[in-house]
Structures are given as structure tokens and as C-alpha cells.
Image: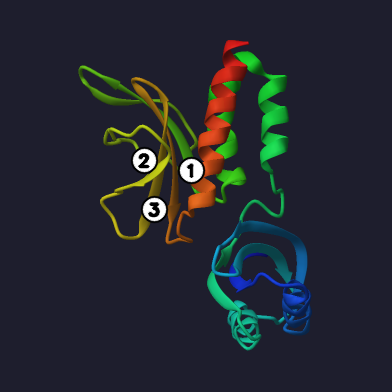
Amino acid sequence: MPFLLRVELPDVPGSLGRLATTIGEAGGDIEAIEIVEHRHDGTAVDDVLLEMAPGAMPDSIVSACNTVDGVNVVWISRYAAGGNLVMDLEAVEELTAHPTEALDRLVELLPLTFRADWGARVRRTPDGVVRVHATPAAPDTFDWYDIDRATEVPSGDENNLFAAAPLMSNELILIGRRGGPEILGSELARLSHLVSLAVSISRS
């Protein structure tokens, strides 16, 4: 079963190598690593997709990582996508290949692209907020958020994290995570960029 591990570590040469060695010694087989964010305080946030060796437990991976100087495990969870990481450029290629469906295709790509549980496109109408297009795990009902840029928005539940980006004057794109990890500023910037590209592609 694949797991997704998010870690904070010193943004210096050798840190990632030491972390990878430690994960391997603890029974984790690394499938992919993505740098999520470089921070001004000299740390980085990385997502590590890994498979567990027979008998290895997630707790042992976390404990081992936390022994590495400067490393902090933010979050670990099963990753049902099975290692099929869809990065931003691949998402853009997919949108370009289907321009007339770009906005709905973006929604379908959001869970993989942002390690989220669901994505949705919603519209504000005189009768309330309606779902235009959503992935299967998305909620049935949504609130409206008056925002002018991608931002984290209240979910009404401390176990859920929502982010939204304006699509048009009366539409939003949303993503949701259950239980974490937190939605970072760099992810909001990526969401805003992809939404803007999807709108441009749909109008081409």
C-alpha cells in the first residue's frame, strides 16, 4: 500500500539524501519525491510517495525520519492513487488536449494534482450554490465564498480543509482534504495559476 509522507527539512545540500537513506533503512521504498515549498527560513517542505516493505509500519517511518537532524514529519497517510502523481505540467497538457472540457477536466485532475480528496466547480444562483461539476467524494452542498484570489476557506469542520479559487464572477473552484496536510501558500499559488490557465484554454 502506498503512503504519502510530508516532511519539513533543512533546505541545504545533503538533507534529502539523508532523509531518503533513513526511510530506506526503516523499510520504506521511495517511489517519488516532490518539493512542495521553499521557505524563507531555510527549510523546505517535501512530499514523499513510498511503498512499505513487508512488515514495515508507518509509525516506524515517522520515528526514523524524526531522528534526522532538522527533519519534522508533518503528516503521513495512505495514498489511494497508487503513485500516479499528476504534476502541474501534465495537468496543463491534459487541459490543452481537451480545451472545450478544460474547466471540468481541471476539477477531475485536482485530487491527484493537489493530493486532495475531492475537487468541485460550483456556481452561485438566486436559489443558492449549486454543483456544476465535482469528483465523487465532494460534498453535496457548498457555501459561497466572496474571494478575489485563491485562499483557504472555512469548512465548518476542523477535520476538513477547503481551498477555493475564483473561476468567474459567479463560479468557484474548490478542493478539499480530510485530516491534512495543511494547504500551503505555494499550493494556493499553483491552484490560482492552473485555474487561470484552464479558463484561458477553455476560451481558445
Q: Quadrant of the C terminus?
A: top right
Residue 118 image label: 1
Dot 3: element: strand
Q: Would residue 53 be seen by someone viewing this image from the given angle?
A: no
Q: Mark 3, mark 2: which one is toward the viewer?
A: 3
Q: Residue at x 53, y 30 (%)?
A: 195
Where is 134 relative to 29, above or below?
A: above
Q: Residue 161, which numbered label?
A: 3
Above or below, comparing residue 144 to residue 112 in the picture: above
Q: Are marks 2 and 1 in contact (CB under 8 Å)?
A: yes
Look at mark 2 in the image and give the residue it sits on.
139
Q: Nearer the viewer, residue 175 or 185?
A: 185
Q: Quadrant of the N terminus?
A: bottom right
Name the amino acid type tagged 3.
Leu
Task: State the residue at coordinates (30%, 36%).
Answer: 142
Quarter residue 69 falls in: bottom right
Residue 151 point in image, percent of width and height: 39, 43
- Amino acid beneath label 2: Pro
Which residue, as the protein is rendered here, is positioned at the far bottom? 67
Residue 52 drawn above or below residue 176: below
For marks 2 and 1 on the same chain, the one whose residue lies earlier in the sequence: 1
